Image (cartoon, helix red, strand yellow):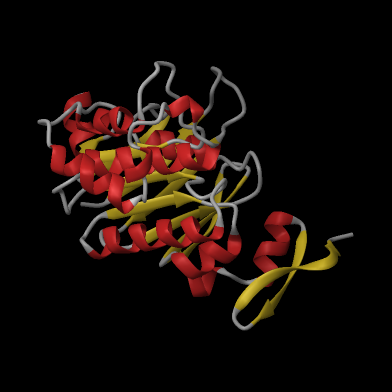
């Protein structure tokens, strides 16, 4: 299954400034696609459009051959899991209960919950109340819920919005391993990332957004060009051992 965006436009207010503007791209099966760009580039909105949570004003978002926002919500949930930037649970659910919510659209499978907890190293936290966890632990619970949701479906889609922003280095690496393994199983993985070092090392393909427009896309090694990043971020980058890093005093004057 692929995720295809065809000339997608979206604005939050009628006749407002487009947040996503005439964007066309395809996220491929078995590959990790990173979405990068500065603040307010449209990354989170794009993921919400891909998840079917928003309907485009113009153009189409297809999960395979089905329109994302028009799909029956249960069918969509069985094919696609979305990890928001700020996971929120208002009830006093335990970690395990939150992960179990991922199975709401499918039949209950305790093996799915247990495996997801183990993969995200949350077994010792399964009975802790979600709201008492650190932000990083909550991010890992949200990932575990998504993994439980698509358990047993190698053709599933995982959409993740800044999944490592609050994680320590160990769990950044663990999350990267989980996403790589999921891609190798044949899933579509799309992640919005601010960490460019992680994006370069993790992603097969990159989409670069700026003011709602797709300004570059392709294999990560080709997209990571200092001139492009300077234009998009307004910061000069240098290459060290194949990794692009911001230069001290490197803003474009």
Q: Position of residue 168 (x, y in %)?
A: 56, 54
Q: Is residue 212 left or right of residue 183?
A: right
Q: Name the residue located 44 percent from the left edge and 17 percent from the top edge.
A: 90
Q: Is residue 248 left or right of residue 97?
A: right
Residue 117 vs 13, above or below: the answer is: below
Q: Is residue 138 left or right of residue 31?
A: right
How many numbered tags mark residues here? 0
**Residue 37 visible in the picture:** yes
Observer-nearest of 32 and 149: 149
Q: Name the residue located 40 percent from the left edge and 16 percent from the top edge.
A: 91
Q: Position of residue 116 (x, y in %)?
A: 27, 46
Q: Quadrant of residue 211?
A: top right
Q: Quadrant of residue 215?
A: bottom right
Q: Residue furthest left?
A: 107
Please identify the quadrant where the C terminus is shown.
Answer: bottom right
**Residue 219 visible in the picture:** no
Q: Name the residue located 47 percent from the left edge and 47 percent from the top edge.
A: 163
Residue 187 vs 64, above or below: the answer is: below
Q: Quadrant of residue 141?
A: top left
Q: Position of residue 231 (x, y in %)?
A: 71, 60
Q: Position of residue 240 (x, y in %)?
A: 67, 80
Q: Name the residue located 55 percent from the left edge and 60 percent from the top edge.
A: 169
Q: Residue furthest bottom?
A: 241
């Amino acid at each position: 299954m692929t995720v295809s965006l065809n000339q997608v436009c979206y604005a939050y207010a009628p006749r407002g400034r487009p947040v996503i503007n005439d964007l066309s791209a395809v996220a491929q099966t078995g590959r990790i696609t990173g979405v990068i760009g500065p603040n307010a580039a449209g990354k989170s909105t794009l993921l919400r459009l891909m998840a079917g949570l928003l309907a485009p004003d113009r153009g189409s978002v297809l999960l395979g051959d089905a329109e994302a926002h028009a799909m029956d919500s249960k069918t969509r949930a069985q094919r696609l899991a979305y990890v928001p930037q700020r996971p929120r649970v208002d009830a006093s659910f335990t970690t395990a209960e939150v992960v179990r919510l991922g199975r709401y659209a499918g039949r209950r499978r305790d093996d799915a919950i247990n495996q997801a907890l183990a993969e995200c190293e949350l077994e010792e936290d399964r009975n802790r109340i979600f709201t008492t966890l650190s932000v990083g632990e909550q991010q890992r619970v949200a990932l575990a819920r998504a993994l439980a949701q698509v358990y047993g479906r190698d053709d599933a889609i995982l959409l993740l919005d800044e999944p490592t922003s609050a994680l320590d280095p160990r769990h950044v690496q663990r999350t990267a391993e989980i996403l790589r393994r999921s891609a190798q199983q044949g899933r579509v993985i799309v992640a919005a990332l601010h960490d460019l070092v992680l994006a370069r090392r993790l992603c097969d393909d990159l989409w670069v957004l700026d003011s709602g427009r797709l300004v570059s896309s392709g294999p990560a090694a080709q997209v990571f060009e200092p001139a492009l990043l300077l234009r998009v971020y307004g910061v000069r980058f240098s290459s060290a051992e194949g990794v692009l890093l911001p230069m001290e005093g490197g803003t474009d004057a």
